[in-house]
């Protein structure tokens, strides 16, 4: 691995031809690649009115959507490009320009998904952002588009996917801050548009029973962890949950042994029984301290990387992963002064060596990033096929990371439908006086309300 040029900001280059092609390809891509065969929209009248108001110059509009899956941008595109346009026509409205949205996307996506994806996102109206630092070009662009852009702006307040259809990650304050900036900019310019923040929920469920594919994926993961799958292939959810807990315990034991015996972190000897029956394992309480053990392992793994980068632990595990990612990018894509002399061959070799070591250290962070969302209680609380699938796919991601494979080609367990729920808009203008008195408290209050609204849009998955 060698050092590369600095990561440049990727500005939006919205191209009507690319957008038109996307509108044609999207339905087929959703059905055949993502296996999303149906779309249900609740609250469409609210979105139609919000778009009408936006295009009439009565409001500026920020769409804040849940982000449980990598398929969410496609679902949002389906909502705006197809469902909204269709609903508008039914009400005798013809939106001009045709509905779409501009957005921010993680600058890391073109690094793991390829530069073609970066090109596509920018030509669909997206701008890149480096999430773990003050990315001023990205923030200025988002602020300008929110104030003057011809289309609504869309953001995922969670900042990243969490792999859980029925759990919302803590929201980051950036969405609320952008909404307040826009409201303040409108007031300062003497403009009379409202600033509306519209919560949108996304949730996926299977159209048919998929217990067979779930059990098949569980078998693959068990074999990957050195476990013998159930020869009877029992599809009873209680038995499957026992096997799921046993798999999580086995993966944790192997990772603990690796970090304790090979990486020499200060981990205690495993105290859990070497073997347990499926019935005993069906309750996570039968595996003593699984949650604390997992948290301790993740913490120590990140501390090792932080020490190698000369950093101190700060924030949640997710916050620490993002800070380490940014520190790794700063090493792998170092900024160079424009008048700097070309490095000598020795300096270049040392920089390449540092890049190799950085890549190795970031491997530990990636494993933590995949495993940190795994929870022993998520399935136990509601053993639905959707929750089983969420957890198994997170474990599949983790095994891929550990084995040095890409997690881009996730298994598709069956045909799905996406439920898109649109809440009533949150008016930001009425909070502007509070924002001017105490910006931090106002941003926090708006973030908390948005969190409550998005959580209220989650519907429990059905139990079979």
Image: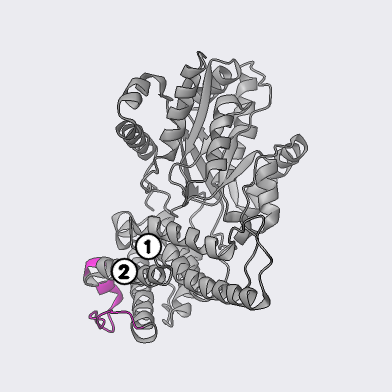
Residue that mark 1 sits on = 374
Q: Farthest residue in the bottom direction?
A: 261
Q: Residue at x 44, y 57 (%)?
A: 322
Residue 415 position (above or below residue 432): below
Q: Mark 2 packing: few (<14 Cα in 10 Å), some, or many (20+)?
A: many
Q: Is residue 333 visible?
A: yes
Question: Residues under labels 1 and 2: Cα distance?
Answer: 9 Å
Q: Mark 1 packing: few (<14 Cα in 10 Å), some, or many (20+)?
A: many
Q: Is residue 198 visible?
A: no
Mark sitting on residue 420: none
Residue 285 position (above or below residue 10): below
Residue 169 position (above or below residue 210): above
Residue 94 relative to residue 203: left or right: right
Q: Residue at x 43, y 46 (%)?
A: 158
Secondary element under disc 1, as helix, strand or loop, is loop
| Residue 218 in the image, given as x and y percentages of width and height | 45, 70
Disc 1 vs disc 2: Cβ atoms closer than 8 Å? yes
Is 184 a magenta residue? no
Mark 1 or mark 2: name the one nearer the start of the chain. 2
Of badges 1 and 2, the one in the foreground is: 2
Q: What is the magenta segment's predominant secondary structure?
A: loop
| Residue 246 in the image, given as x and y percentages of width and height | 34, 74
Residue 195 relative to residue 151: left or right: left
Residue 38 position (above or below residue 261): above
Front residue of 206 and 157? 157
| Residue 97 in the image, given as x and y percentages of width and height | 68, 24
Front residue of 12 and 387? 12
Residue that mark 2 sits on = 294
Span of residues in magenta: 264-285
| Residue 261 in the image, given as x and y percentages of width and height | 35, 86
Which image quadrant is residue 300 in?
A: bottom left
Q: Residue at x 50, y 20 (%)?
A: 186
């Amino acid at each position: 691995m060698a050092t590369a040029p600095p990561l440049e900001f990727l500005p939006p280059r919205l191209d009507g031809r690319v957008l038109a092609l996307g509108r044609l390809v999207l339905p087929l891509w959703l059905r055949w690649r993502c296996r999303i065969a149906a779309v249900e929209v609740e609250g469409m009248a609210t979105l139609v009115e919000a778009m009408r108001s936006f295009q009439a110059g009565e409001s500026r509009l920020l769409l804040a959507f849940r982000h449980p899956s990598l398929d969410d941008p496609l679902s949002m595109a389906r909502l705006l490009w197809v469902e909204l346009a269709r609903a508008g026509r039914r009400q005798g409205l013809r939106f001009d320009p045709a509905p779409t949205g501009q957005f921010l996307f993680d600058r890391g996506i073109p690094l793991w998904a390829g530069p073609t994806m970066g090109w596509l996102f920018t030509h669909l109206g997206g701008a890149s952002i480096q999430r773990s630092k003050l990315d001023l070009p990205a923030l200025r662009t988002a602020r300008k588009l929110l104030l003057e852009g011809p289309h609504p702006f869309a953001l995922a307040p969670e900042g990243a996917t969490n792999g859980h259809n029925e759990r919302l990650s803590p929201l980051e304050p950036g969405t609320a801050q952008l909404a307040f900036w826009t409201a303040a900019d409108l007031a300062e310019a003497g403009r009379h548009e409202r600033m509306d923040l519209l919560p949108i929920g996304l949730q996926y469920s299977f159209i048919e029973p998929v217990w067979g594919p779930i059990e098949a994926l569980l078998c693959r993961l068990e074999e990957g962890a050195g476990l013998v799958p159930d020869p009877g292939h029992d599809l009873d959810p209680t038995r499957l949950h026992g096997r799921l807990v046993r798999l999580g315990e086995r993966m944790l034991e192997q990772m603990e042994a690796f970090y304790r015996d090979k990486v020499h972190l200060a981990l205690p000897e495993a105290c859990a029984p070497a073997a347990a029956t499926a019935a005993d394992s069906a309750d996570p309480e039968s595996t003593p301290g699984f949650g604390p053990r997992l948290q301790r392992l993740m913490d120590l793994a990140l501390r090792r990387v932080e020490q190698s980068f000369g950093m101190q632990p700060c924030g949640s595990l997710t916050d620490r992963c993002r800070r380490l990612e940014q520190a790794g990018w700063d090493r792998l894509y170092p900024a160079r002064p424009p008048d700097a002399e070309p490095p000598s061959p020795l300096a270049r070799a040392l920089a390449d060596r540092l890049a190799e070591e950085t890549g190795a250290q970031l491997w530990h962070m990636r494993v933590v990033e995949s495993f940190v969302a795994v929870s022993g209680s998520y399935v136990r609380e509601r053993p639905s096929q959707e929750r089983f699938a969420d957890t198994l796919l997170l474990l599949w991601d983790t095994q891929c990371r550990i084995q040095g494979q890409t997690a881009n080609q996730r298994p598709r367990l069956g045909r799905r439908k996406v439920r898109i729920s649109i809440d009533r808009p949150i008016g930001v203008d009425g909070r502007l006086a509070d924002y001017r008195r105490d910006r931090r408290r106002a941003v926090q209050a708006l973030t908390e309300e948005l969190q409550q609204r998005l959580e209220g849009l989650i519907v429990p998955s059905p139990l079979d």
